Amino acid sequence: MKVTVVKNVLAANDRIAAENRALFDKNGVYVINLMSSPGAGKTTLVEKTILALQNRYRIAVIEGDIQDTYDADRIAALNIPVVQINTGGACHIDGNMIRESLPAFDLALIDLLICENVGNLVCPAEFKIGENAKVMILSAPEGADKPAKYPLIFQESSVMVINKIDLFPYVDFDLAKAKRDALSINKELQIFEVSCKTGAGLDDWIKWLTDRIDDFKKPRV
Amino acid sequence: MKVTVVKNVLAANDRIAAENRALFDKNGVYVINLMSSPGAGKTTLVEKTILALQNRYRIAVIEGDIQDTYDADRIAALNIPVVQINTGGACHIDGNMIRESLPAFDLALIDLLICENVGNLVCPAEFKIGENAKVMILSAPEGADKPAKYPLIFQESSVMVINKIDLFPYVDFDLAKAKRDALSINKELQIFEVSCKTGAGLDDWIKWLTDRIDDFKKPRV
């Protein structure tokens, strides 16, 4: 019975996510669902991505947080349209929360919409929002055992960004194990090793994203 | 309607947690519910606490994980009774999971039971398990904005262990802000600054815990 309820919730969410997706397709909006533990560097990656791409694409951001607007304030400072979703305690954003936030944007004027999820390595992975790609961040101080311990988010994501590589000399992070375990869960996973602090490795991430957006927006014959 | 369901779930959990608590009281078992983001250092703090206290108290551990036994294996290596709860995807442990695991122990032979929750800074804070104290870890690389962004876990906890202080020179962590914001949410919060890697600061945490256990086990007149 309990499982049935959960399945209904997920099925209802999938339906709303598909409706969001249709709306994004119609307007040519490429959408990222960005997920990680608290403090892995989601907002900083959003900032760096905006700085790299804002002259090339029209970018908007949805910030999912439990109750505050700290992250949205950081994005607004970059003169990017941003909507704050306050989940009121909930541990993830879902399709309906995204749908409710869309009237705040003119979708026809957006090329790239980045949705930053609530900081949580577990729950967000279950809920589609209508994204083109789920992107997750694993930061070096969290440890290389995370793919084996929290597999769903690695399975669902198209990209794993390994962040804070500038801390490699100071933390015990087995990079080979993290990559091997993540790829054993999801052999299609794209992996980028970056430091949002120093800027190292960000070019490869930006190139991947640019290729995806350009391919998505290419006129279909 | 949705809110009513959630309240019923929490009320049912509170009832089971109270039953667990009565059982722990009867057997003189002091119980900690240990919570944090993934990779903040829960298992390592459990290991260090066991090493410091295993000659003084009879210790047992319950490991809550989504699917694996990696953490339980680390504890079993210290010759400590340990039970693995696999939540099968769920993002926290609850009162019923603890109740189901208790037949594996002889509670009359345990002074301290440490329950390591699933790595998640959001959901575990909502579910009592029958603990004497909730203890949460904030690790320096996560950033000092976490109390303001995830307030419930700071509000519910008796202790905040700030871990990985050996990384202070390499990360931007505003210690004063983290402490100030956490105390503004919960002015009773005990704060310890430690490095489980170097051992710095652990004595204060061990003394706090020892005082609590001794007080709990003192015969009442």
Image: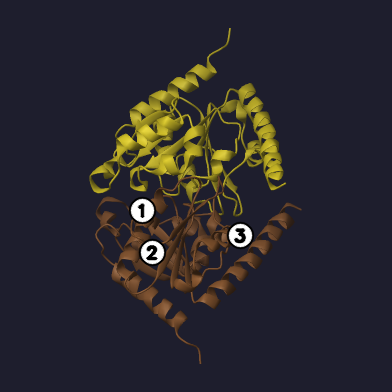
Chain colours: A brown, B yellow
How packed mark 1 is, by other alpha carbons closer than 10 Å (few <14, some 14-19, many 20 or more), is: some
Mark 2–mark 1 Cα distance, whole angstroms, equals 21 Å
Circle number at residue A161 = 2
Check the image and report above or below for A25 versus B119: below
Residue A39 visible in rendering: no
Residue type at numbered disc 1: Arg
Tell me where residue B75 appears, x and y as whole percent. 47, 42
Check the image and report above or below for B106 versus A164: above
- Do marks 1 and 3 both belong to one polypeptide chain? yes
How packed mark 2 is, by other alpha carbons closer than 10 Å (few <14, some 14-19, many 20 or more), is: many
Name the residue carrying label 1: A74
Check the image and report above or below for A110 versus A150: below
Mark 1–mark 3 Cα distance, whole angstroms, equals 24 Å
Circle number at residue A96 = 3
Tell me where residue A33 appears, x and y as whole percent. 48, 64
Q: Residue at x 53, y 18 (%)?
A: B217
Nearer-the-camera pick, B108 or A205: A205
Nearer-the-camera pick, B49 or A44: A44
Residue type at numbered disc 3: Asn
Residue A196 picture quarter: bottom left
Q: Residue at x 49, y 68 (%)?
A: A106
- Check contact, mark 2 vs mark 1: CB within 8 A: no
